[in-house]
């Protein structure tokens, strides 16, 4: 099967994003994730199965099967913006690595058409899967959530060992531009000690472009109700500016990388 005919499952395409890679980007959200982060703002991304979600505008079907060619029809509409801003396509989710054939075909076909590519991912897959994709990824926005395996498991459902190992392999490959992104979540990792630990780890990887601290928000809360699920973070207050400034400073004083708040 050719790349354009390869079928995958997505739940959204968002145009004109400026926070998920360089320039103006079109984000393709792939369905399915191996983690169950308590703070996840896209709970409709987690299950691979197509499901329904109650929204303000009625019941919506989350998930549809599409070909790479169909996705790129939408992506191609914004070529002018990509050219002027240095933007392109970003694969997000969910975890795009859960649909490796589709992700590979989408990235490879985008590159063949001269469209810049990025992926938002926490690197939770067999190394072979990631290695195959790397030559077709211009920017890898890699989530690192915690340095402690037990804490990671408690809040996401899985230990972090494979992800940290893959982070090192991605960096050492030199095949893509790597940026580390940290969701900053109170009661989980929003302490100077933990952010300093992540910064030191990122600094130990070769060639990392920078660290983005992304403050936890509650924008996904209503989606849980819409899916008939409980939102266990309702009592967690998002980090305020003062705390974020402190954490930024902790990151900066523990690495030589460019650190910033937001993507
Ligand atoms: S890795 Fe991302 S998409 Fe998956 S559960 Fe965590 S926050 Fe949600």
Image (cartoon, rainbow, N blue to C red):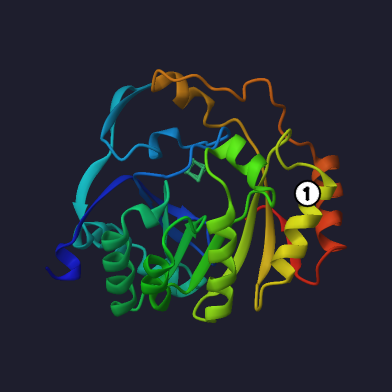
The quarter of the image holding the N terminus is bottom left
Q: Residue 200: in sight, yes or no?
A: yes
- Would you call the spot at circle 1 few (<14 residues within 10 Å), some (14-19), or many (20 or more)? some
Q: Is residue 251 above or below residue 174?
A: above
Residue at mark 1: 194
Q: How many marks?
A: 1
- Work out which quarter of the rendered image holds the C terminus and state it: bottom right
Q: On the image, which quarter does residue 208 sit in? A: bottom right
Residue 81 as seen in the image, left or right of residue 260: left
Residue 66 higher or lower than 56, as above or below: below
Please provide percent x and percent y for residue 177: 55, 74
Q: Residue furthest left?
A: 1
Left or right: 51 as drawn, with respect to 196: left
Where residue 155 sits in the image (x, y, percent)?
A: 60, 36
129 or 45: which is nearer to us? 129
Instruction: Give the residue drawn at x 44%, y 33%.
Output: 43
In x, y percent, where is residue 61?
26, 31
Residue drawn at 61 percent across, 35 percent down: 154
SS class, disc 1: helix
**Mark 1 beta carbon near ligand 1 (under 8 Å):** no
Residue 249: name its quadrant.
bottom right
x 83%, y 41%: residue: 243
Q: Position of residue 47 (x, y in %)?
A: 35, 37
Residue furthest bottom as drawn = 174
- On screen, 103 above or below 184? below
Name the foreground residue: 243 vs 170.
170
Residue 19 appears in the figure: no
* Residue in view at x 81 percent, y 56 percent: 196
């Amino acid at each position: 099967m050719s790349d354009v005919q390869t079928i995958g499952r997505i739940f959204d395409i968002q145009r004109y994003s400026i926070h998920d890679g360089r320039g103006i980007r079109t984000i393709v959200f792939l369905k399915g994730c191996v983690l169950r982060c308590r703070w996840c703002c896209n709970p409709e991304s987690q299950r691979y199965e197509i499901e329904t979600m109650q929204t303000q505008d009625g019941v919506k079907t989350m998930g549809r099967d599409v070909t790479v060619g169909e996705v790129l029809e939408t992506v191609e509409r914004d070529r002018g913006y990509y050219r002027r801003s240095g933007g392109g396509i970003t694969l997000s989710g969910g975890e795009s690595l859960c649909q490796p054939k589709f992700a590979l075909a989408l990235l490879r076909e985008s590159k063949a058409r001269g469209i810049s590519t990025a992926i938002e991912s926490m690197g939770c897959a067999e190394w072979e899967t990631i290695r195959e994709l790397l030559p077709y990824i211009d920017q890898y926005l890699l989530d690192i959530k915690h340095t402690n395996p037990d804490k990671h498991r408690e809040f996401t459902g899985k230990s972090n060992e494979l992800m940290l190992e893959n982070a090192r392999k991605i960096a050492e490959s030199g095949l893509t531009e790597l940026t580390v992104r940290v969701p900053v979540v109170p009661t989980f990792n929003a302490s100077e000690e933990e952010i300093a630990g992540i910064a030191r780890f990122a600094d130990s990887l070769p060639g990392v472009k920078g660290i983005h601290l992304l403050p936890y928000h509650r924008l996904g809360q209503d989606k849980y109700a819409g899916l008939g699920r409980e939102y266990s973070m309702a009592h967690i207050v998002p980090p305020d500016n003062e705390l974020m400034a402190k954490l930024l400073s902790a990151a900066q004083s523990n690495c030589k990388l460019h650190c910033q708040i937001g993507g």
